[in-house]
Image (tube, rainbow, N blue to C red):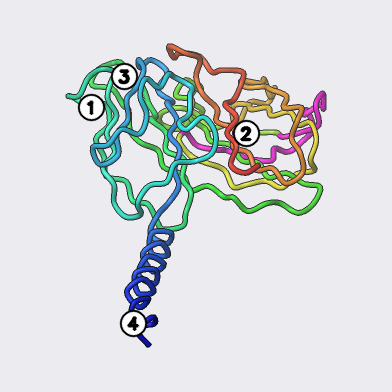
Amino acid sequence: MLRMMRSLPMILAMAAFGIFATSCGTDHAQMRFVHASPDAQNFDVTIDGKSFATGLSYGSVSPISGYTTVKAGTRALEVFDTGTTTNPRINSNISFTSGSDYTVLASGNVNPQPGTIAPVVVTDSKTAPTSGNVSVRVIHDSPSVTADGNSGPGHIDVYIVTPGADITNMSPNISSLAYQQASAYQTLTAGPLQVIATLTGDANKLPIANQTYPDLATGQVRTFVILDNAGGGSVSLTPLELSDLN
């Protein structure tokens, strides 16, 4: 009996720790941050005043692979020019749902002042596709896509095809994707894939982005971000590849 009484505090402490660990696991989300402002300098990023990324260059993602855990709920996101702590480029409250995964992009241009930089928040999927397949989506974040009758940057069509395929008579996998929007995930056969973006409505289907990804393996989930070239003013031919899973 005495031995049991002596052990009781330790048992209760371990039980309490287990409850705490469980609650910590259920009130957190995962996020990654992309510097997608083509004419901005490097960024320092904070969440609730704590450093998330330092010296992040254009077209880079933090963390380099995977995600960083953040507490669920409304978090204060601030983005500063590297080395500064005042006049943030972004100062926004972002809502994160427990158990969800997010990509947050610093989107828009610095110039002309006061600039158009704002956070674009998209929810990611870590659901593996069926055997033999990959799952891919596209985010349109190029402010230099020529307008196509819409206000602001134009919409794009995206073809995800076997490398070298002729898209002349093909329908796009993703149609009329608006600026700062993410497409739905597309399930495709694993293997080399070519991502081609064209301006919506362009009868000639002239590629404004065109890149082959040779190593997409079964079970992988990928996000491709259509960006400007550094400095802005033109679309990068090479979308940024982000690994959502595997």
The amino acid type of the residue labelled 2 equals Asp
Residue tagged by mark 3? 110
Work out whether residue 149 or residue 31 is closer to the camera in this orientation and state it. Answer: 31
* Magenta-colored segment: predominant secondary structure: loop
Q: Nearer the viewer, mark 1 or mark 4?
A: 4
- Which x, y percent locates residue 49? 23, 37
Q: Earlier in the sequence, mark 2 or mark 3?
A: 3
The amino acid type of the residue labelled 3 equals Val
The amino acid type of the residue labelled 4 equals Met
In the shown orientation, is residue 197 left or right of residue 150?
right
Question: Dividing the picture into quarters, in which one does residue 171 lie?
Answer: top right
Q: Which residues are magenta?
A: 160-179
Q: Earlier in the sequence, mark 3 or mark 1?
A: 1
Label number found at residue 5: 4
State whether residue 29 is above or below residue 172. below
Q: Nearer the viewer, mark 2 or mark 3?
A: 3
Q: Is 177 within the magenta?
A: yes
Question: Badge 4, how many Cα within 10 Å: few under 14, some, many 20+?
Answer: few
- Asked if the residue under mark 2 is in contact with the one under mark 1, i.e. CB atoms within 8 Å, the reply is no
Q: Nearer the viewer, mark 3 or mark 1?
A: 1
Label number found at residue 116: none
Q: Earlier in the sequence, mark 1 or mark 2?
A: 1
Q: Nearer the viewer, mark 3 or mark 4?
A: 4
- Which x, y percent locates residue 55? 37, 20
SS at mark 3 in the image? loop
- Asked if the residue under mark 3 is in contact with the one under mark 2, i.e. CB atoms within 8 Å, the reply is no
Question: Badge 1, how many Cα within 10 Å: few under 14, some, many 20+?
Answer: some
- Identified at 37% across, 26% down, the residue is 108
